[in-house]
Amino acid sequence: MRLPVTDQDEPLSGTRALGEALGLTAASDALVDESRRAALAASAAMWPASAAVLLLAAVTLALLALGTGDRALALSLGWRTGAGALLALGCWAVAAHPRAAASATQLRVATLAAGGAAIALCFALGIEAAAALPEALHPAITILAGAAMVALALALQPLRAAALALVATLALAAVTVTRAAPLPAVIALASAALLAAAVIRAARTRQHALLERRQQRAAERRDSQLVAEFETHGPGWFWQSDRRGRLTYLSEKVARELRGLGIEPIGAPLTDVFRVDSAWVETERTLSFHLSSRTSFTDYSVRPAAGGSGAERWWSISGRPARDELDRFQGFIGAGSDLTEQRRAEAEIKRLALFDALTGIANRQRMRLALEQTLAQAQSGGTHPTGLFLLDLDRFKAVNDTLGHQVGDELLKEVAQRLQRTIGEAGLVGRLGGDEFKVIVPNEGDRDRLAALAQRVIAALSLPYHIDRSTLSIGCSVGIAVAPGDGAVQEELVRNADLALYAAKADGRGVHRFYREELLHGAQKRKRLEDDLRQALAAGQFHLAYQPVVSTADARIMGYEALVRWDHPQRGLVSPAEFIPVAEECGLIEAIGGWVLDTACAEAVSWPDHVRVAVNVSPIQFANPRLPALVTAALAATGLPAHRLELEITEGVFLNEDASSEQMFRALKAIGVRLALDDFGTGYSSLGYLRKAPFDKIKIDQSFVRGAIQPGNRNAAIIRAIVSLAETLGMETTAEGVEQQDEIVLIRGLGCSHIQGYVYGRPERADEVRAQLAAAAGYAVPIGHKTSRAARHRVLRSARLELAGERGEVRVRNISASGAMIDGVDLPVAAIGHAVTLVLDDELALAATLRWVGEEGRAGVQFEETFDLEWLNQPGQRRAA
């Protein structure tokens, strides 16, 4: 294949090309000059013998002439042929000059050509003169002349120009000698022309061969440079071994690295220099196998045979057997490439795939794999227990919302560090995402030790954090499940730990709970409730009940709060405390809330003009930008004046306080509806949003009302402060949860403008509301106890109620020394008077009697023995006074 023409490969003109081919012009490159110098060296090697032959011929001719007695002819022959012999000695000196410059080669060639022509001319003249000798000597003269010319031709043959000059000179001499005979002269000229053409053609052929060789050398040089560049700066390298598998060549950069590890690669067996990384599936066979079987291999991952830092180096090598032209095995040749960065990148990708990018601990994927492996080992080696913790941070969302995600991220990092320090070598810690963490405690099934570890975790994570010059306090809830009792496979174990975590959060947070079978039953019941809830709205199973809101000034009914009720076809009335959280979680709260809004407006439109209707708005509804349009549509469809609709909003809407919240408040106020802050004091209780949000009323939560009448209770002072704040801001106040008649006097005396509670009646349907408004000219008549009962403690604690052999999860809302109020259980009225057992925290079982059953899944029990309330503050101790 012909290579591209370079500057040095440009074709020469005819005269210049002929001159370079004959060696008479300057060489175009080093290769041509090298060829000329080689020709001069070959000529110089022949000149000693040629000069000797010429000198011998000259002496012999002179002696033959002296033998005839013709001294003048002998002198003439000696002068003519002797000059030629002397010129031969000069040519020898020129050809063999040891210090001749490279640039003088063409001059030396020209000198030798001229010298050879002169020598030929001298001997031609001598032979011409020798014709005068007797004819008997002519054969000897012919032999001497032929020997001299042959010797001269052999010395000049390597030099094309000199050979051409010799042919031309001999042709001219032949013409001169045979000028009397035309035919021999013509034959001599024709022969000279043919010889000259042959010499020129040979010179051109040689020149063309030199050009091809020059191109081949350029290609080889370029290939060598590319290979050297690739070996030096690229990721690849080359190697070669002999028949015994010993390295005979290795790229310097790899050889240098191996020498740094104490391995001298050249001369060492390939298997002693590299070892196959068998952890990778592409290296199915060993290098020794391929070397011994003389088979090719491709992309084998290898590492240095020595340890140390070489353990961090990886290469990929390929090789194939090399054979000569006779198909004889010569060894292996191959190439390699650097895999170190690729392997490091793969390791980093694997690390990122198995470790949490924020905290550096194990992520969800690694925890899943670790738990699967732990459970599989436990099953194969016997019933080794495994503890699983699921953790959820308490009040973390408030940190994110108030201080920003950057502070939240720093807090998560510190939580992860504390959690790892607390768990130590006992287990594996991981983050599932957000503020959820998981801990696997292998070979541990003792509940006391797991409980102690969980308590240490809660205590450690509950200590203050100092981040960005802020002191933060959060808590932690822990759910615990133990394999194999709580689940032998991962999905079941994680589900049960999650149920335990849900129970821990329901019990007030900051505690740990173990999985119990009742939790699964509760979750299954909750799932059935969700399924039924999805059908309830379309089936018309909801209705509204209205609780009056009464003025403290004159006991006049000023409005009603609309409360949704679910009349289940099989379960009967389902408590809102039971189904509203489910509706919020499964995304049904907006549909239910829209139905409540439309129905309340439609039923309230027939009430007296001064009577308002209050509708609760969940944070999910409040976050919907379409809420103002929905409110406007409900008012327009029913004809209810906007000022008679009051929207009750909880403090939960301020968790994501931003510009959209302020815009929502402005949009609702623009409609003309009233806004009430519900359950004030139970959320963040921040006064900042009272300044910005345009509320018309503050509803004081019932937790402040209950017990306020008791001597020494601080709730009354809190109510008075809230009322003063509301009056200053131009807002009304409603005290919720008033149940005793003597509390009416207290609330009125504290300055509250309105009262809502059982003291004025339980929630009733719309037809009962109309009857109530018609009776007593729209004024409310108090009912219920006239004086307050014994002091009660408001708590939020999970418990278990046992009745007639049946068990159910309940929640204790209020508790006193003599009894408690519970909710979350649907009991028939016929159960009143039956003996029950209330089990608190699996530590205390209280014998009691069921005294009343109310709406919303609530009930009251009376203890058979007085209960010591101090037990609530000292868990773990069982007391009954």
Image (tube, helix red, strand yellow):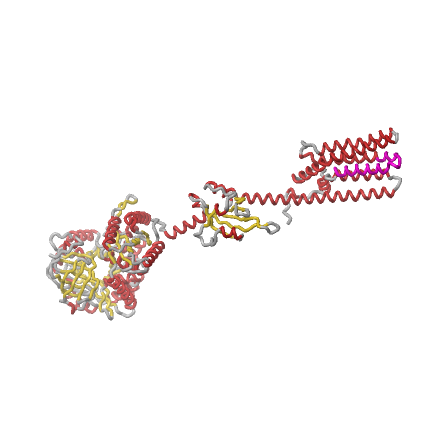
**Residue 682 place in picture, x, y as percent:** 22, 55
| Residue 690 showing in the rendered view | no
Residue 581, quarter of the rendered image: bottom left
**Residue 668 place in picture, x, y as percent:** 28, 58
Residue toward you, 659 or 358: 358
The C terminus is located in which quarter? Answer: bottom left
- Relative to 54, say whether 791 is above or below: below
On the picture, is 287 further left or further right than 393?
right
Q: Does the magenta stretch include residue 154?
A: yes
**Residue 73 place in picture, x, y as percent:** 86, 30
**Residue 582 place in picture, x, y as percent:** 27, 62
Residue toward you, 660 or 308: 308
What's the residue at 11%, 53% (across, down)? 711
Residue 26, quarter of the rendered image: top right
Residue 524, quarter of the rendered image: bottom left
| Residue 146 showing in the rendered view | yes
On the picture, is 471 further left or further right than 847?
right
Q: Is the magenta stretch mostly helix, strand or loop?
A: helix
Magenta stretch in the rendered image: 127-155
